[in-house]
Amino acid sequence: MTPWREQALPQGGHEVDLLRGGDALFPAMEQAIDRAEAEVWLASYIVHTDEASQRILQALLRADRRGVRVRVVVDGFGSRAALPWWQQQLSGSRVALAVFRPIDRWWHWLQPGQLRRLYHKLCVVDDATAFVGGINLLDDRLDLNHGPLDTPRLDFALGLRGPVVGEVQHTVRRTWTRAWLGHEVTEEWQTLLLAPEPLQRARRWLRARWNAWRGTRAELDRRRQQRQEAEGDERPVRLAFVRRDNLSQRHAIEREYLLALRDAREQADLICPYFYPSARLLRALHRAAKRGVRIRLLLQGRFDYRLAEMAARALYVDLLQRGVRIFEYRAAFLHAKVAQVDGHWCTVGSSNLDPTSLVLNLEANVVAWDRGLADRVRHAFDEALTGAEEIHPTTWLPGSQGLRGWLRRALVGWVAQVYLRAAGGGPY
């Protein structure tokens, strides 16, 4: 049963920019990093060696040379090809690069939990500006499996200013610390324990750490107060930062979709490249459609994984029969995870609606209750439809029913359950 009482609580006082693709996100990130005075925190599933990654990396190094504290955490699987290059480029700087669940040794593959990946795409500058979305640190016109692309991927992120930025920073800080443990901390404590006077050294080490943290927080609090006094109450957007982890927030993002669909009365638009939602989400879609809500799904049309194609299309028959409109995006690869409901609720983030995102990965979304932002999301959805093809019931249903269609759906469901059990994710 869904714990409705634990839904995210919105906070007001935000400015929000909807950014389409890396062409909009990366220059905004670079400018924010170049204005950094105290701290920069960056988390990404994928980093690369292309021009987009190089520009952000150089901005991080410039910040480091100005005395800004820079911390970066990347996923050990998604960024594995580029990690040696990033480590070489950062060598000699004070930028601390942490790797979440590294797989640079053969025995790492045997460790439990390796299928649980860091899927965040987050950046926080000075506790003042945050970027949250689905865009990896990779050029829109480059695909790791297919090479250069003629048309950029469809993807989105949000630029944020306001109270929730502190929550985004806390998430990146905690993830970075989790990845860094066993590296810096272990080395420092080994030095302490082997020292002639370990207790005295430990006290000095802890005192230095406390003073450094207290000084940084005091400076950030002072600057935040100055910004709030200058900005007043002219930032009305109400939103919440919602993360999914494997501890206390296991169903947080799924819960927000469930609540929005439960309350939907007129329309719901969802963009998702990997679509195989839980039984709870499917029931919520079914019930909304039964109430007369116009539901449109924009899904992947260029599939990079055969199983993902089978999983999404296994659900088409049931959804089409209930009046849900399905579009496949054919203009380019689809990577956006975006939704809007009734023109006043919307979400942008990293989470797909599939078992990997909803049960295993570390994910992060922004959920907003704002007509202006929801309207921008709806316009982005409508614009994307120009590059999509609708799946019509009259042509799809006759060829997808019968024994063959049933066997395909059964196979997909079985594979999903086996995968989740192997990953320790439990029933779906």
Image (tube, rainbow, N blue to C red):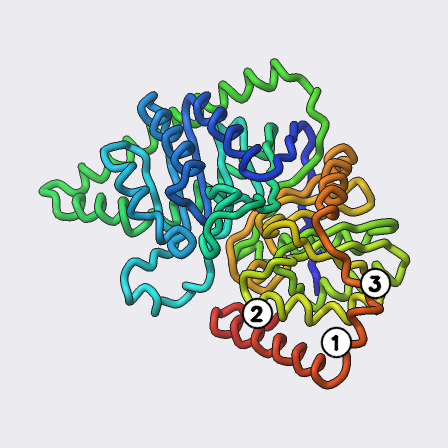
Give the residue at mark 1: 400
Give the residue at mark 3: 287
Q: Residue furthest right?
A: 292
Q: Residue furthest front?
A: 150
- In front here: 262 or 226? 262
Q: Is residue 169 left or right of residue 8?
A: left
Looking at the picture, how far across and down is residue 331, in whole percent?
65, 50
Q: CA distance from mark 1 to mark 2?
A: 17 Å
Name above or below for residue 340 compared with residue 54: below
Residue occupying image coordinates x 45% and y 43% = 43
Looking at the picture, how far across and down is residue 123, in whole percent?
49, 36
| Amino acid tagged 1 | Ser
- Helix, strand or loop at mark 1: helix
Of mark 1 and mark 3, the one earlier in the sequence is 3
Residue occupying image coordinates x 36% and y 53% = 80
Residue occupying image coordinates x 49% and y 24% = 31
Q: Quadrant of the C terminus?
A: bottom right
Q: Could you tell me if residue 33 is visible in this image?
A: yes
Give the residue at mark 2: 307
Q: Quadrant of residue 255?
A: bottom right
| Amino acid tagged 2 | Leu
- Helix, strand or loop at mark 2: helix
| Amino acid tagged 3 | Arg
